[in-house]
Image: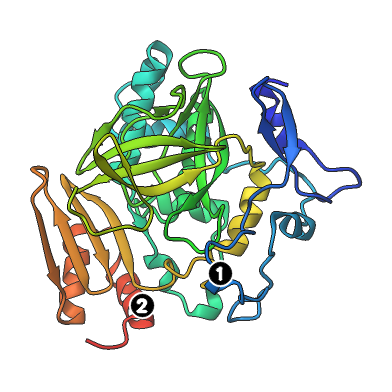
Amino acid sequence: MNLCGLRMIERLRVLQGHFKSAIDVRITAAGQRVPRPFPGITSLRCAQHSQLSNSDSHNRTIPVSAHDLARSADISEVDVPYPLTKSEAIHFLEKVLKVPNPVKLCQENKISFLKKVTEGMNRALPFSNVVLLGRDRDLRVAPSLEECKQEVKALRGGSCFIVNTFNKALLELMGFRCHHVPGNDSDSIYNGTHVGLIVVDLRYPGSRDIVEAGTTKPLFDAIPLDFKDESPEYQFGHVRSKFFREEQRVCWCKEIEKDSQKTRNVMIKGGKKWEKLMEYEVDVLVPFPMMVKMHSVVWPSAKIIPEIHGDVMVVGYSGSDFVKIRGKYVSIIDEHLRECSKVSKTKEELIAVFQEYFPQFTKEMVVSAIDNNIQSW
């Protein structure tokens, strides 16, 4: 089966309905596709977390594997449509991402078009938990696909799921062929909680490119996966990136200073130090309904992704500045790669920072997120 079989995978119901067993696809060297257990959220990164139970602090059940996740799914129609129309996609491309004549450009040069879209998505949409943390803990639920779309249109961005599912829908409406793959954030406790995106057949039949707009680091172009062991180096904004193959995974790394004392997730290649940011399971095709179901379990759970439920966080571009707000701490890197950092001493100071750099978040949203998560000044 070639990659056009993805639609069949997405429509697949394992015998006797409702995803009786979790199946994904591994692509062998011979190009064959064979099922294997989906890595999902099953494996723990370190032994100290092995005592975690199957429920979070609000007694919501957390599937310990993708098999459990799939069995718990109640999906009568496997093919879940994303609520985005072609006219909405064109409007977003023209008015938000500032892509002139997007239909013509896409027809004439898909690679150039995809580069403009990818950089535009990275610059327009921050990674953020403000909306999530603005809700009381008992009311934190994953947004619907329609709510995800509205967060993107409001330029509030959000999680990898919110940004990358919108991007997939937009690209498919423009004629691209895409699928989601699981990723492993280097800071996460569980594996498989990142929603990655692969574009296929972009450069030649069977080619695959990582397209990423849903993380805290800029990646302004599609990254071809046609390298053997390691990719060329890429400079996007303040981050110098490189990709390495490790068995069945592709690791996205950023260069760090040679005298850095960091040792966790750090490798030395070619005399340079590289810190691992993300691992992509590039051979695993995740049916969209399973991704939706996984997000509904993962996103609201402080146990699975505690870093998202901790400090108030917004990371992204404001004009030409790359701005990171985490709790009381603010870091700003300008277009000349000069960095300045400061600490907000009062709630009012932090609110003012939000209003200056990320005005798409209303004052009420920011105040709610701060009040729910920052206990003292």
Question: Is disc 2 surrounded by few (<14), some (14 to 19) or many (20+) residues within 10 Å?
Answer: some
The quarter in which the N terminus is drawn is top right
What percent of the width, then of the height, locates residue 58?
A: 60, 81
Q: Quadrant of residue 82?
A: top right
**Which label sits in the foreground, 1 or 2?**
1
Secondary structure of the residue carrying tag 1 is: helix
Q: Which residue is mark 1?
A: 47
**Mark closer to the chain start, 1 or 2:** 1
> How many numbered marks are there?
2
- Residue 172 image point, x, y percent: 53, 29
Q: Is residue 244 left or right of residue 85?
A: left
The disc at residue 368 is 2
| The C terminus sits in image quarter | bottom left
Q: Nearer the viewer, residue 152 or 6?
A: 6
9 left or right of 323 in image? right
Q: In the displayed structure, would residue 27 be above or below residue 141?
A: above
